[in-house]
Structure formats: C-alpha cells, structure tokens
Amino acid sequence: MNYQQILEKTFQEIIPYRKLGKQADYIPELAKVNPNQFGMCLRTLNGESFQVGEANVRFSIQSISKVFSLTMGLALMNDDLWSRMGKEPSGTAFNSVIQLEMEKGKPRNPFINSGAIVMADILLSHLRNPKTDFITFVRAIGGNESIDYNEALALSERKKSYMNAAIINLIKFYGNIVNRIEDVLHFYFLMCSVEMSCQELATAFLAFANHKAAFNYGNVKLTASQVKRINAIMQTCGFYDEAGEFAYLVGLPGKSGVGGGIVAINPMSYSVAVWSPRLNEKGNSVMGMKALELLTTKTKESIF
Ligand code: DON
C-alpha cells in the first residue's frame, strides 16, 4: 500500500473543506490557535511512518487524553472501574448533563466529560504523584520526553468551566466523587491540556493498534484483552453523539478532541492521527473527519 501517495491525494482533496466549521472558543486559549492548519501522520506496525502538512506541530489533545486516563484507570482497577462509570455510548454531547441526573451521577462511559472527571478522581485516589505519573506515561507511550502540560491553557479552561463545574457538582451530590472538587477539576483540565503532534499521537496509538503485544509504558501495564476493550470503547464511544457517523464514514476505532485532533487505529495494521482546529457542531474536526473518510475509502481498509 502506498500510504504516502494516499496521504498526499487526501491532502489535496480536503482543500474545499478548509474554511468549514469553527474552532472551539469556550476555552479562551484555544481560540488563539491559527485555525488554518492541517496535519496528518500514519504509522504502521512495520515501523514505517508517513505524513503530510503540519504533522510535527503540537496542539492541545483535549479529549484524546481520555484514552490515556482510561488506560491508567484500567491498569489500576481493572473491571472494578465499571462500578464508577458505564461503557455504553451516550448518544449525547460530550458535556451533556441530562443523562447524568437520570442515571444518578454514574457517567455513561469514560470518554465523555463526566466519565473522564470521575476517572480523574480515581487517578487522584490511586496514584502517589498523579500529575507526574500521568505525564510520565504519556511521554513513554508518545516516544518523546518533551511532551508536557500547557498549564496556562488548563487555567484558562478552569476560569470558564461552567459546564464541567455543573457536571462535577452533580456527580459529587450522588457520591461518585471522592476528592475535593477543585483538585479533581484541576487535574482533569491538566490532562486535557497536554500538547502533542500528529506524529507523537500516531506513535502513542500504535500501542493500541498492536493489541496482541505486551503493553508496558512508564509503569502502566495492560493485558492484550484490556487493550482490546479500550479499542472497543473507542469504537462505540470515541465521538460522543457522532460515534455512529464516524463508524459509518470511517470505520475505525478512534478518539477526537476539541483541539481539532482525531486519532484512529486499524488493529494490527496502523495508527493515524489528524489535526485541524475547525470543528463541526458535534465538536469533531471537519477536515480531520473528511481526511480519515478518504483514507479508508482509498485504501479500502477499515474494520468492516
Ligand atoms: O472538558 C472539556 O470540555 C474539554 N477540556 C475537553 C472536551 C473535548 O475535547 C471534547 N471533544 N470533542
């Protein structure tokens, strides 16, 4: 498969979409990012790497961090995790509170804000140095020691965090948050603020694509069957109320973030990361979704 040629053709064919959508501005620092950027990187299990555009520029991974926090949570608690949250698609927006009240503070899954906030609470309870342990793991899996939090961005999100504050207060009322609200929100925003490039994200997600191999990064160990489960949750819950659309158009497990990044994997074959800041109304990158749809159409490779 000539992935480089396919990426270059894809890069050309998404040009008509470059002004569609709007970058996230409810996090003030994200509104400052130049929206006219696009990067894509594909890495195969054979060790090859292909890229186009701004694939080495770091951006805010936002909700993609929810895959890393689930990984740490599963390594710590295994199936006990599911007493604190579910693993079903929500069919609602990433920051929705509707289900949360009906379901008495038990989030639907770890990839919506409510679930990731409970996960932050779990990590705070179990890890000796949560902030250091989380970034150590992300650096190990992303293959670069200079990957870091953007603390200014995390603080800027905190200042405007009305929805997440509502979510955590509701969960706390139902007794599903153990630590102090301030501490949990701060750690959650820090995890979202991590900055990585498409190249680093594609490197990190090769570990999930390679689900039959031993998973051991920065002291986070998973069994093959735990990695399989993370991939299943990416498939069903990775795109909020657009998970069905992503499966229909692209056909790969993946995860998006409001920074404009999307990562997807083709199990036992490759991982691919795309980034472009303009989002559709569901909070997923317009050019990113289109590029992945073109990739799986041109290669005729998807999980279906
Ligand atoms: O909590 C928030 O709203 C953001 N820090 C993350 C949301 C996000 O990335 C959802 N993605 N599409």
Image (spheres, helix red, strand yellow):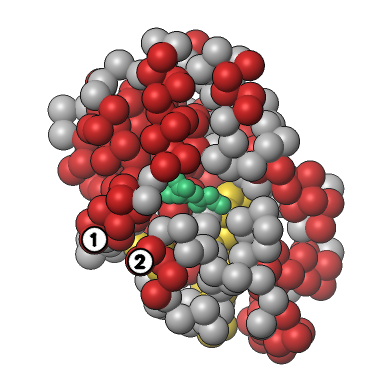
Q: Amino acid at mark 1?
A: Ala
For image coordinates 23% across by 32% down, the residue present is: 183
SS under mark 1:
helix
For image coordinates 73% across by 48% down, the residue present is: 242
Image location (x, y in percent) of residue 141: 36, 51
- First along the sequence among labels 2 and 1: 2
Residue beneath disc 2: 29
For image coordinates 26% across by 41% down, the residue present is: 186
Spatial separation of the CA atoms under disc 2 and disc 1: 8 Å
The quarter of the picture where residue 38 lies is: bottom right
Image location (x, y in percent) of residue 154: 29, 53
Q: Amino acid at mark 2?
A: Glu
Residue 236 in the image: above or below residue 30? above
- Give the left or right position of residue 302, taking residue 204 as reference: right
Query: Observer-nearest residue: 247 or 63?
Result: 63
User: Contact (CB < 8 A) between labels 2 and 1?
Assistant: yes
Image location (x, y in percent) of residue 198: 48, 68
Residue beneath disc 1: 152
